[in-house]
Image (tube, rainbow, N blue to C red):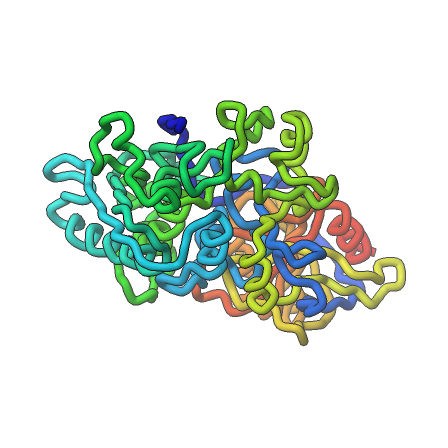
């Protein structure tokens, strides 16, 4: 049996972006469109119904293929950013993914220990108790889903992780040990420690005289979040009721996500080089499937895997149980359909938002209107709109850049818009829109840079 200490961490990134091209004020022309969901295409799945994995270009180290793709709808727990519409304690398709990775049905004793100082983190005199209660509830949820006769040991702590004006690391986690060639596992394949011990039915760390209660996985939460490092009001919410206030982050949901990584929803392939961990595949990699090359990642060369890791929406999780559940779980894919003018007529792929209402099959339709906020960059929509009479009752078109997406959409909503289209400022697939604001009541999507330019050009005629 081979055993290795795994030193890499897996980071949950909160994507809050800024930046974008300037544009001139607009004079609205007649462009009629509909934002809706196409029930014939599952949002977040490939043509064969397999759930897509997150493979953005460029690679986002620590927050990439070990996540479901952000195009999934409804939003999934194991996406790279936490959505405010996730139900508290719900692990959605992650339960089936864990089974595909090898976890048996049953129960497990998931024990949490804390690695903080006497008055820090989980031992903080004010927040310590609510933090411990929330994390132990999360451990209990996983313990009711995954079967193991061996205790699953989790080590948790708080530390100062990255945080800035455009984003923050909410937490990071990963397995502490990985094992290969043990009874119950696939030969020549790495498994995270807790999963390996479940399959083997024994505490594998005893083989080299390690502490039998040593942590199988570790989780570190960002202590800067409760210091409101992003902006005022952005902190963890430790409640267990799911009623997360505007601007706060559900600690329970973040902990569920991170513990999911440590328990097995994680691949060890180096996305920047394509190299396998210690030259051998891990169980997650064997289920990672490139739909263009029609190969699993363990069947590819390093160079092929490196290229595949940037093949947006062409890499899927090839687990039978996950695919079967996804068929009745995922909603139709969001699209933008333009009927008029004929020069723009067609169906356009769009990214959806983690905030606001979800698009329905019926969708919303109407004329498009380019926003004007009266600033030097009027189509960014970062200030209250001065052309509310043109936007009211229409679908607002806004450029990406300079401020958070929720601010842009809120200004359009305040002006009476029935929906929003954000124009991306980079080539390639239009990503989804991150952010959280429960006051937003209109749907929004993001369209690609090339398609967005054509729409804006028509609106300026």
Viewer-nearest residue: 151 or 455: 151
**Residue placed at 11% from the left, 46% from the top?**
125
The image position of residue 345, as x and y in percent, is 84, 62
Which corner quadrant holds the N terminus? top left
Question: In the figure, is residue 58 to the left or right of 338?
Answer: left
Q: Is residue 213 above or below residue 439?
A: above
Q: Residue furthest right?
A: 342
The image position of residue 171, as x and y in percent, is 36, 42
Question: In the figure, is residue 405 to the left or right of 449?
Answer: left
**Residue placed at 68% from the left, 69% from the top?**
39
Residue 279 appears in the figure: yes
Q: Is residue 352 above or below residue 332?
A: above
Q: Residue furthest front?
A: 183
The image position of residue 138, as x and y in percent, is 30, 55
Residue 435 appears in the figure: no
The image position of residue 291, as x and y in percent, is 70, 45
């Amino acid at each position: 049996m081979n055993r290795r200490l795994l030193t890499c961490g897996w980071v949950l990134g909160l994507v809050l972006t800024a930046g974008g091209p300037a544009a001139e004020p607009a004079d609205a022309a007649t462009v009629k469109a509909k934002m809706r969901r196409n029930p014939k295409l599952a949002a977040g799945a490939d043509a064969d119904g397999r759930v897509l994995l997150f493979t953005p270009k460029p690679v986002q180290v620590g927050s990439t293929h070990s996540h479901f793709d952000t195009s999934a709808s409804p939003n999934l727990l194991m996406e790279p950013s936490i959505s405010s519409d996730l139900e508290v304690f719900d692990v959605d398709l992650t339960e089936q993914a864990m089974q595909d990775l090898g976890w048996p049905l049953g129960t497990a004793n998931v024990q949490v220990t804390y690695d903080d100082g006497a008055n820090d983190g989980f031992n903080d005199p004010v927040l310590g108790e609510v933090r411990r209660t929330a994390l132990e509830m999360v451990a209990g949820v996983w313990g009711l889903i995954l079967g193991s006769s061996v205790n699953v040991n989790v080590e948790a702590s708080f530390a100062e992780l990255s945080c800035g004006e455009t984003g923050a690391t909410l937490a990071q986690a990963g397995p502490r040990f990985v094992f290969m060639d043990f009874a119950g596992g696939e030969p020549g394949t790495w498994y995270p420690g807790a999963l390996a011990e479940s399959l083997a039915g024994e505490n594998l760390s005893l083989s080299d005289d390690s502490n039998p209660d040593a942590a199988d996985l570790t989780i570190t939460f960002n202590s800067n979040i409760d210091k409101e490092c992003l902006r005022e009001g952005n902190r963890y919410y430790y409640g267990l009721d799911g009623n997360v206030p505007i601007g706060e982050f559900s600690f329970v949901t973040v902990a569920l996500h991170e513990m999911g990584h440590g328990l097995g929803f994680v691949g060890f392939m180096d996305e920047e080089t394509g190299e396998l961990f210690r030259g051998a595949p891990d169980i997650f990699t064997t289920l990672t499937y490139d739909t263009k090359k029609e190969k699993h990642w363990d069947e590819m060369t390093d160079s092929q895997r490196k290229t595949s890791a940037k093949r947006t929406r062409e890499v899927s999780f090839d687990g039978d149980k996950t695919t079967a559940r996804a068929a009745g779980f995922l909603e139709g894919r969001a699209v933008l359909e333009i009927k008029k003018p004929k020069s723009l007529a067609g169906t356009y792929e769009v990214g959806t938002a983690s905030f606001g209402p979800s698009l329905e099959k019926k969708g919303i339709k109407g004329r498009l209107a380019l926003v004007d906020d009266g600033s030097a960059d009027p189509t960014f929509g970062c200030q209250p709109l001065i052309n509310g009479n043109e936007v009211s009752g229409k679908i607002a078109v806004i450029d990406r850049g300079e401020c958070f997406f929720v601010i842009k959409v809120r200004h359009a909503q305040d002006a009476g818009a029935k929906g929003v289209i954000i124009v991306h400022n980079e080539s390639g697939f239009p990503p989804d829109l991150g952010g959280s604001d429960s006051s937003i009541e209109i749907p929004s999507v993001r369209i690609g840079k090339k398609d967005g330019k054509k729409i804006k050009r028509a609106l300026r005629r």
